[in-house]
């Protein structure tokens, strides 16, 4: 008889044990020869070494499944505890166009042609510039690509940033410390991550620095290596700011810039770093520029008509 403790982090134990330990009881029935005691993120097992090794292999299979799909049902447990557990994971993970499985197992995938193109060119380019109207999914898909790269261990961290133009104008009038003042301007980025990563795991990632969200000014002086970096609202960077950001790129980094050149908040709109970058970087190998349009808008159906109306109004001026 031996005793072993198996630990797992970044998962709410409820997802593994189930309500009133319903999932845990199902697991126990498959291992009648060992004693299983679960407390928090630790499982103590007592029994013969051969049986404990079998249990450990299966419990890590369940944990791997949850990390991949952000979901683990009682039916999943039954299938995974069979001999073909790995085949079950591969079968579920082969859904066409799925980038990642988000919160509660929600499949996150490209819906429009330009979103699919962004995913495709990301395979062969290390710097991508995407621009187009609000609601076209530019930032959402970019962050999903970053999360996928992290899950696949292609990078060690995700860095998401945006210029705090409005924050720069009104920062002194807002209550709280610097983080509390800036968080409202970074909230859309938090929202996307919360849609893709369970809350507890996201909190752990952010505390460890595996995922960092910060204003663009915080990038100065850094070398962003072995990282997937997303710059949102890039149209509001100045030429000098964007040059500073792009030159932070480490040897094994992937950069995606997203923006909407019709919504430049800079005092001097001619000084937009994104507009200049699209002109001077377009012919460099390894850099891809993708333009989204109104057909990519996936918010309320009225958003598409609103964008078209403003475009028509601007063209008539």
Image: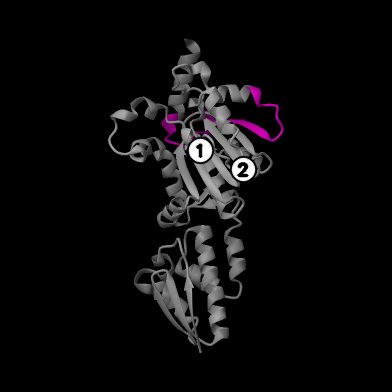
Task: Specify the quadrant of the image occupied by residue 239.
Answer: top right
Q: Is residue 224 above or below residue 246?
A: below
Q: Are marks 2 and 1 in contact (CB under 8 Å)?
A: no
Neighbor class of circle 1 (other Cα within 10 Å; few <14, some 14-19, many 20+) is many
Please tell me the numbered disc located at residue 253.
Answer: 2
Q: Nearer the viewer, mark 2 or mark 1?
A: 2
In the image, residue 98 lies at what x, y percent? 57, 50
Q: Residue at x 57, y 41 (%)?
A: 224
Q: Residue at x 44, y 33 (%)?
A: 301
Q: Is residue 290 above or below residue 309?
A: below
293 magenta-colored: yes
- Residue 181 visible at all: yes
- Residue 137 visible at all: no
In the image, residue 183 lies at what x, y percent? 37, 39
Which range of residues does the magenta coloring cover? 280-303
Instruction: Please state which of residues 118 and 223 is positioned toward the viewer in this rendering.
Output: 223
Apparent side of residue 164 relative to residue 20 in the rendered image (left or right): right
Instruction: Please state which of residues 240 and 79 is positioned toward the viewer in this rendering.
Output: 240
Residue that numbered label 1 is attached to: 139
Q: Residue at x 49, y 22 (%)?
A: 262
Please give the count of numbered marks on the rendered protein. Answer: 2
């Amino acid at each position: 008889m031996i005793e072993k403790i198996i630990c797992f982090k970044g998962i709410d134990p409820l997802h593994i044990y189930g309500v009133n330990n319903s999932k845990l009881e199902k697991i126990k029935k498959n291992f009648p020869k060992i004693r299983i005691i679960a407390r928090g993120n630790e499982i103590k097992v007592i029994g013969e070494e051969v049986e404990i090794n079998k249990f450990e292999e299966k419990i890590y299979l369940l944990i791997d499944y949850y990390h991949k799909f952000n979901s683990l049902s009682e039916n999943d447990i039954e299938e995974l505890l069979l001999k073909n557990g790995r085949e079950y994971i591969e079968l579920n993970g082969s859904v066409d166009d799925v980038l990642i499985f988000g919160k509660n197992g929600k499949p996150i995938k490209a819906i429009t042609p330009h979103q699919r193109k962004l995913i495709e060119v990301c395979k062969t380019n290390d710097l991508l510039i995407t621009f187009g109207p609000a609601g076209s999914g530019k930032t959402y898909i970019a962050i999903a690509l970053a999360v996928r790269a992290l899950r696949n261990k292609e990078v060690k961290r995700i860095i998401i940033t945006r210029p705090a133009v409005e924050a720069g104008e009104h920062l002194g009038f807002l209550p709280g410390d610097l983080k509390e003042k800036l968080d409202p301007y970074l909230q859309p980025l938090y929202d996307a991550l919360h849609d893709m990563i369970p809350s507890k795991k996201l909190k752990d990632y952010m505390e460890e620095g595996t995922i960092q969200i910060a204003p663009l000014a915080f990038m100065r002086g850094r070398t962003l290596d072995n990282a997937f970096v997303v710059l949102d609202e890039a149209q509001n960077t100045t030429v000098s700011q964007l040059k500073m950001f792009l030159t932070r790129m480490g040897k094994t980094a992937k950069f995606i810039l997203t923006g909407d050149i019709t919504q430049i908040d800079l005092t001097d709109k001619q000084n937009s770093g994104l507009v200049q970058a699209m002109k001077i970087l377009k012919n460099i190998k390894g850099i891809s520029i993708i333009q989204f349009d109104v057909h990519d808008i996936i918010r309320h159906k009225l958003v598409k008509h609103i964008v078209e109306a403003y475009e028509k109004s601007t063209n008539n001026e």
